Image (cartoon, rainbow, N blue to C red):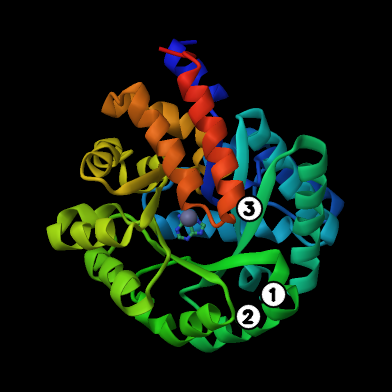
Amino acid sequence: MTDMRRFIEHMPKAELHVHVEGTLEPELKFDLARRNAVELPYESVEEMRAAYDFDDLPSFLKAYYEGMSVLVTEQDFYDLTTAYLARAHSQTVLYAEIFFDPQAHASRGVAYDTVIRGIRRAQEEAEERLGIRTQLIMCFLRDMSADSAMATLERSLPYRDWIVGVGLDSDEKGNPPVKFRDVFARARAEGYRLTMHCDVDQENSVRHIWQTVRDIGVDRIDHGVNALEDEALCREIVERGLALTVCPVSNRCITGSLKALEVRRMLEIGMRATVNSDDPAYFQGYILENLVATQEEADLSRDQVVRLAANAFEASWLQADEKRAFSDRLAGYAASGAGP
Ligand code: ADE
Ligand code: ZN
């Protein structure tokens, strides 16, 4: 193992872009399929992994939604979340903001309460047992209607204290941010923080990023790499201090490129880039593998790697005192002389 890899492994980290349903490893998928008597179209874990051969967002989303068929009971959501948190903890993730997709479960007859209660129990237990701190972000599916998103927002209100913010994911083609203007305005009024996916190399990527900034007024942007194509947009993002949650291994699976040089460019022009895993079970890379691949490909310095981690703690939706405590832990690690 290189000194840099060891340094990254033990560096205190925050993950701001991970879909809990995207952490469903093939082994657990098989276990849950057996438990719930769900038939899978694969004979083995190896066959399932081999089928994870995506070339665009829709081909990934097809596998992602198919995989959810095994998630039925509260215990399933608990087991899923517990497995992710153990893995994240093993890579020195101290804090994670975790997406979940309630509409993808409701459409299969799995109740909102079942999903959120299972996830929440795992969060509480992991915080107590492992010390890993987490918050939840509820995503709306952009290829469903704005009315469905609004109904989901209303469904979330009894759980307002368990959810820190809302996001927007699924298939971007033909589903611009402004489709959800009223939903996000209402979410803001309810006290939620706002983020949205602007997936990489999509039709109208740059226009969609402008919309998230100017029309929606997001607090953060998920992906957003194509902002680099527009100087005025970069300036606006820097001025507003908006962080971008880049997911390099996901980018490689979906676009053929890690976009690691783009991450370096963001750092160089003062954009608050962070590195995250997105759907680690499907793309086969957790946050450590994402950071290592990015560092190697873009030849990032030790300081730049620390900056990526610092950006994540600073851009998190924690209260100021907790944010400062995590940032101080990272600064202490960086000053300790560990690593290259
Ligand atoms: N759902 C899960 N991961 C996603 C991604 N990267 N983009 C859009 N929707 C998603
Ligand atoms: Zn995502």
Q: Are marks 1 and 2 in contact (CB under 8 Å)?
A: yes
Ligand 1 neighbours mark 2 (CB distance < 8 Å)? no
Mark 1 Cβ inside 8 Å of ligand 1: no
Pick whichever of labels 1 and 3 is earlier in the sequence. 3
Q: Nearer the viewer, mark 1 or mark 3?
A: 3
Q: Secondary structure at mark 2?
A: helix
Q: Disc 1 to disc 3, how far (Cα)? A: 16 Å
The disc at residue 20 is: 3
What residue would you read off at disc 1?
Answer: 106
Which of the 4 image quarters holds residue 178? bottom left
Label 1 environment density (alpha carbons within 10 Å; few <14, some 14–19, many ≥20): some
**Amino acid on which disc 1 is placed:** Ala
The amino acid beneath tag 3 is Val
Using the rendered image of the protein, determine whether residue 26 is visible from the camera's viewpoint: yes
Along the viewing direction, whichever of 240 and 84 lies nearer the viewer: 240
Q: Of 273 and 144, which appears nearest the observer?
A: 273
Q: Which residue is mark 2?
A: 152
Looking at the rendered structure, the kind of residue marked 2 is Thr
Q: Position of residue 308 (x, y in %)?
A: 40, 37
Residue appearing at x 46%, y 14% in the figure = 339
Q: Is residue 88 above or below residue 146?
A: above
Q: For this view, does 196 lie left or right of residue 230?
A: right
Q: Residue furthest left?
A: 231
Query: Regarding mark 3 in the picture, which secondary structure is present there?
Result: helix
